[in-house]
Image (cartoon, rainbow, N blue to C red):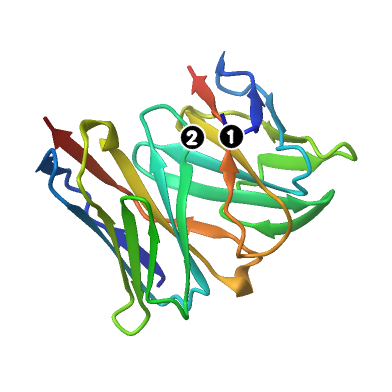
Amino acid sequence: DSGVTQTPKHLITATGQRVTLRCSPRSGDLSVYWYQQSLDQGLQFLIQYYNGEERAKGNILERFSAQQFPDLHSELNLSSLELGDSALYFCASSPRQGSAYEQYFGPGTRLTVT
Amino acid sequence: SQKIEQNSEALNIQEGKTATLTCNYTNYSPAYLQWYRQDPGRGPVFLLLIRENEKEKRKERLKVTFDTTLKQSLFHITASQPADSATYLCALMNNNAGNMLTFGGGTRLMVKP
């Protein structure tokens, strides 16, 4: 158990809908990262937050947005969903903003868009 | 363009042998390189981190080497066990990219008893 929690575990929704994925980092970790993993694309970095502020962006679509709240939990919002958004979404956390720190991944949310 | 390449073919070895996985990269200047293990349907689990000025790092049966001239990292599991069967991902962290981790596609290791 990494100490990172994600809800829900599974989500099935229809195209065009909007969903929110939630992540609670390990106690004391200030950095939160979101990743998307699909069969054909591998594990792709989406976005990073550090202590409430956005710090880095990867290949995140404009239909996707995220935020980190004062209690450090984070939410990833996915809107106007398409079939291709079906994937595993992982959240990870690390103690501080520094590249020497390993990342701790949550169990993921499996999103299925039908 | 930047690339991280891991052997996409599964590596099949016999229990007790040493498994060696390769991670090659181009157009990166990584300060750190990390290795993760991922089991099906689960989140990656951190294994080892090696810095650019370190040649080798060990942890129990695991060993990682980092050659910034060859732009390559090797990941070794000695005395492999069936429980080591998983996908192993290498990841690069570039200090100039907001500590973003970029992952390779992973290599699936199968250890047969």
Q: Is residue B10 left or right of residue A68?
A: left
Query: How many numbered markers are drawn?
Result: 2
B94 sits to left or right of A19:
left
Examine the rendered structure and indicate whether residue B93 appears above or below residue B46: below
Front-most of residues B45 and B62: B62
In this rendering, the answer to whether B49 lies above or below A29 is below
Question: Residue drawn at (56%, 29%), measured in percent from left and top?
Answer: A1
Question: Is residue A98 at least partly visible in the picture?
Answer: yes
Quick one: SS at disc 2? loop
Q: In the image as oriented, which residue stretches furthest toward the front? A: B60
Residue at 25% x, 35% y: name it: B85
Q: Whole-percent x and y of residue A34?
A: 62, 43
Q: Are marks 1 and 2 in contact (CB under 8 Å)?
A: yes
Q: Nearer the viewer, residue A99 or A63?
A: A99
Q: Which residue is mark 2?
A: B43
Residue A2: assigned label: 1
Instruction: In the displayed orientation, state which residue is furthest to the right.
Output: A70
Q: Which mark is residue B65?
A: none
**Mark 1 falls on what kind of element?**
loop
Image location of residue A114, percent across then percent down: 48, 17
Residue A95 x/y as whole percent: 71, 51
Residue A13 showing in the rendered view: no
**Disc 1: CA contacts within 10 A as few (<14), some (14-19) or many (>=20):** some
Subunit of label 2: B
Q: Name the amino acid, label 2.
A: Gly
Residue A3 sits above or below residue A43 on the image? above
Query: What amino acid does circle 1 point to?
Result: Ser
Crowd tier of the residue under label 2, counting other residues whose Cα lies within 10 Å: few below 14, some 14–19, many 20 or above: many
